[in-house]
Amino acid sequence: MTAMLRAENLIHRVTTNEGPLTLLNDISLQLARGESLAITGASGSGKSTLLGLLAGLDKPTEGRIWLAGEEITSMDEEQRAAVRARCVGFVFQTFQLLPGLTALENVMLPSELRGERNAAGRAEEFLKRVGLEHRLHHYPRQLSGGEQQRVAIARAFCSISGGADSTGSTDGILFADEPTGSLDAGNGEKIIDLLFQLNAESGTTLVLVTHEQRLAQRCQAHLRMAAGEVAVAAGRGDGSLSEVSA
Amino acid sequence: MQSANPLLPLKLLVRDWRGGELALIATALVLAVTCVTAIAHFSDRLTRAMYIQSQTFLAAERVVSSSRPVEQGWMAEAGDRGLEQAETVQFASMLSAGDQFQFASIKAVSDGYPLVGHLEMRPSEEAEARVVQQGPPPGEVWMEPRLLPLLGLSIGDSLQIGESDFTVTGLLDHEPDRSDNLFSMGARVMMHRDDLEATNVVQPGSRVSYRYLFAGDDAALNDYFKWLEPRLTEHQRVIDLREGQPRVASALDRAERFLFLAGSLAVLLASVAVGLAARRYSLRHTSYVAVMKSLGAGRGKVLGIYLGQLAALALIATAAGLLLGSLIQAQAVALMADFFPVDPPPSGWNPLLVGLVTGLACALGFALPPLFRLARTDPMQTLRRDWSNPDRREWLGLVLGPTSMLLLIWWLSGSLPITLALFAGMALLVGGSALVNRLLVRGRLATLGGAWRIALGSLQRRAAFNTLLIAAFGTGLLAMLAMVFARTALIDEWRMQLPDDAPNHFLINIAPYEKDNVQALLDDNGVTATELYPMVRGRLIAINDVPAKERKEQAGALRRELNLSWTENLAPDNRIVAGDWWDGVDTGNGVSVEAELAERLNLKLGDQLKFSIGGLEVESTITSLRTLDWNSMRPNFYMLFAPGSLENFPATYITSFHLPPEEKLFVNDLVRAFPSVTVIELDKIIERIRDTISQVSVAIESVMALMLVAGVLVLIAGVRASIAERLQEAAIIRTLGGRRRLLLQSLVIEFGLLGVAAGLLAAAGAETTLAVLSQRVFELPFTLHPLLWIAGPVAGALLVGTAGTLACRSSVSQPPLKVLRELA
């Protein structure tokens, strides 16, 4: 099976006033198209840093990453941005909706950044899929936390759908950073259901960072991190996980 | 990757308006552009009006004035270059009609005269004045109406000038260049140039003024005068438009420069507001950009979006500023219609260009650097949830903003020294602000406790911004204070220079034989006049045996004839600053020189001056230097000779006196008794000067008010930059039990103290400005203005206290829970 996401021997260091600090140490992993991976760990364990590197938001100090078949570690920032525009979607803990734009306009944003036509039609379709067709013209401040996160999910899938084929299937990969971290249990549950449902429908690959064990358990693979290293790497055992290694 | 939707920047611009920073940037840009455009328009129209009037004043675009005929080749050369030309010859001569004789000033004009402007004449005494573009034809003369009764003539009668007879065919009401020689002898008679030779009145040695008039294409004129310049002798000089109305022009020029300088300060303050607002905007948008980048927007695309926004905003604001500036100047010109010498023509494109460049310089110089930093936002910040702007490369902002302002102000003021002085002044002000700020936060005010402690804490945390705020607001306040106090001084000073009983009439061309009778008539009517000064015209041709033409000084006094006089007594407004007045001592050929002219010509006591008077040379030695008050409306002279020095030369006398409006009819008696004497009625001119001062003051005050508004914008921009932080602090204090009133008090104290600091600084600056103005401009002794030191801090505290507290009131009024939740 073709690897949708592959990382080899990732090491990431930063310079601090106290000297160099290793945030990630020798991490390798591989995910096939449509697979899901949960990254867990205590605060400061390096999980968000790993998520950022895998999504091409930053470059590792050492090691290589392939995203949708392209080696993003050899690319400059503009080239990595182009890859993200083509096949990466993001869901953040604090939603990160632009407060001056309506729900519809927030979801249109990725298409507009790509200069695509019919951005509004597509965004409306995704908002319908997350059940917010009646909230199209509401501003983020007029929406509840759960609704805002649903808008963010619609935006993420709209972002990925830029690279969709004629069947609606994409080479997309969705990165979610604590997607339920700002929500109550009830809303969190609904968001998780929605995320996995859309993931299954569109065949996207899913990488998420979470503290919640039950969310991690719904993923096919689980990477638990401690002090920048992989403490536990596990597949679900149903054969669908290609490889998770440390 | 495709480029982003081109309408996206506009959509984000519209949607982000509520954030406040864009509105602030737009307001500051509109203010800067409005201010500069209005001034540029006004100045442009004024210059054009002055230009037209000066042309009219000369009856040409350029004139060569000469005391003897010029070579015919000069005129032929001008003709070859396609220039229009005309000639006038002016001299004094006796007219005769039957047994009546009258001395008059005769002007022989060639075809084509006047090249610019027009004549007004009447074919009969009862007829309406006609505008004509040509003087009388050969064989005819036109004359000033008052000559008819003096000579017992009517229209159609014959008049003799020299050996020729002429027919009087018209009354001359107006000639454009009448004031070219106020000291001409007697009433005017105009004849044709071709008739001059036949009269035989102009003989070698006659006192004759030849004027050669030129008009035409600018380039051809310039080329011709470049060709002519080296051929001119000491008897000839070129009169260009600038000499049309030199004193009014220089006063307006100063007012114009001052307006531009004040306008530049308003632009500078507005730019600081733009910079602060753009910085805040950039910080607030860090999270947006991080999200956009995580969605795949590269740095170029982000920069494109924000540059698109800035360009749209700058263009809209600049267009609004251009429109507003144009409307304001149109209104100002309409209000000041009387003040313009002629109907001011519409301005050209230049003011709009000035406004456009100002808008772009403000926007690009101050808003661009924060946007460049914004485009460098690290997308990893979305995961770290850290919205500080980590890009520390502030150098671009520190270089681009001041550089763009320096270039702009240099361009606007046209003077690098003034620009550098302005920047040095601003640097001093910022330094002063830093010092005042430091004293403020290091004081023991915090020991007062409660609201004082909170306010002082806030001042300490925002020390850098407060320095800027004190400087910005101090500048606005300084300008206002200096203007209010200087205006009072200015108007008072002018009033003192032009007191109610200031001479408002000049009598000139009084012949020596009329002197005693004129004095008697004045005395009989209870009119107190200044001394009757004799006057001869002469040219300074050498200084210490160095010919004037070879002197490097460019003083006009070396190029034109001067009015020379002599007197026993020093006039009350004259003061000897070097050497001694003669006071009865025989100084032989001594001369007293006006001090400023002496300075311009590098003259000192004992220098030998050589004058050419009526073709004869006179040598004299400088025995004293004098200061005098040109605005006293009394006869005054650059050169005053010792009694006896010039008595052998034909002189006329001059005096001035004050005539109240109710006694105005006395002028008629005077003219009837002494028809050859010219009366210059200055009362109307004085009234116009007074109006001019008050109108120019209004214009200057308006610009000062705009400066203060710019200061308020800086304050709002600064407060908004810290509003999130303030909201959080206030929410925490309130959560911990602090009362709303306590917070409000702390805000009032914080901004009130800032206002007091800005006001103190402004008072110091205004006092210095007033001291310089007093000593350098008004030549008054320095006096302290205690009221200034009270008005400054009080006005500062009220303005900054109110504006700052209002701008921050949301931090106190919002429920703390809501604030903490939103900031979480």
Image: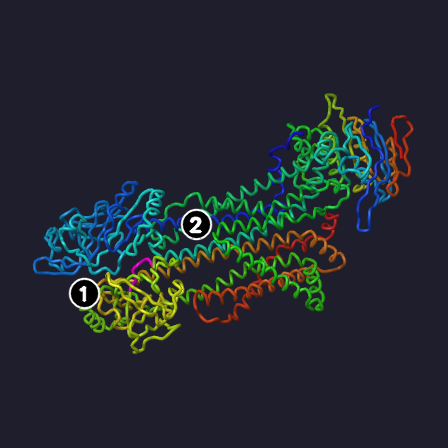
Question: Percent from the top left, x then y, of residue B655?
Answer: 27, 68
Q: Name the residue under label 2.
A: B329
Q: Nearer the viewer, residue B215 or A182?
A: B215
Distance from the alpha carbon under mark 1 to that under mark 2:
47 Å
Which residue is at a point 54% across and 55% down the rendered structure image?
B709
Question: Percent from the top left, x then y, of residue B306?
Answer: 62, 40
Tell me the chain of label 2.
B
Image height of B714 relative to B500, above or below: above
Q: In which quarter of the image is residue B542?
A: bottom left
Q: Name the residue under label 1.
A: B674
Q: Quadrant of residue B664?
A: bottom left
Q: From the viewer's perspective, tell me whether residue B628 is left or right of residue A209.
A: left
Tell me the chain of label 1.
B
* Extreme-bottom residue of the structure: B584
Image height of B587 relative to B371, above or below: below
Q: In which quarter of the image is residue A220?
A: top right
| Residues rendered magenta in the picture | B558-563
Q: Which of A95 and B771 is in front in this view?
A: B771
Question: Percent from the top left, x then y, of residue B23?
Answer: 58, 46
